[in-house]
Amino acid sequence: MAAAKEAVVRRMVDALQRADDAAINDLVGDEILYHFPGRSPVAGTYRSTHGAERGGRPHEWNVARIYHVDGDRIGEIWLMIDDVSAFDAWIAAT
């Protein structure tokens, strides 16, 4: 069972790297929760996907995601950003 869950997460990471919205949508559950840390305007818990662009500018940061796999789909994602304060400041400045 662990190998099957790992395969789901690997497919998700691959889809995220390709920015393949269709594959991402196929991999997430209908009631997915996406937890985004911090106090910025984008912080919070989401039931939809999250983009990495703000104000027309792309932004990169180091991140870890914890996936809760329910069957063959992802039901919950916890996002951990390495420097939440710096990211919050960038969001507030745009």
Image: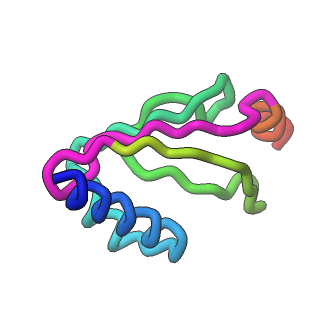
Can the viewer see residue 41 in this picture?
Answer: yes
Q: Could you tell me residue 77's position as x and y percent?
A: 40, 42
Q: Quadrant of residue 14?
A: bottom left
Front residue of 90/94: it is 90
Residue at the image point whose x is 54% and y is 35% from the top: 36
| Residues in magenta, as a range | 68-85
Mainly helix, strand or loop, the magenta region? strand
What sort of colour scheme is used for the picture? Answer: rainbow
Q: Is residue 35 left or right of residue 63?
A: left
43 vs 63: above or below: above
Number of marks in the image? 0
Q: Residue furthest top?
A: 39
Residue at left offset 33%, top offset 40%: 76
Kindly identify the residue that appears in the image at 64 percent across and 26 percent down.
Answer: 38
| Left or right: where 46 falls relative to 90 | left
Residue 47 shows in this picture: no
Which of these two is toward me, 79 or 39?
79
Q: Quadrant of residue 12?
A: bottom left
The quarter of the rendered structure image containing the C terminus is top right
Residue at 82% across / 40% down in the picture? 90
Pinpoint residue 21: horizontal percent, then vertical percent: 41, 70
Residue 56 picture location, percent across and down: 74, 61
Q: Is residue 10 magenta?
A: no
Q: Position of residue 63 (x, y in %)?
A: 63, 47
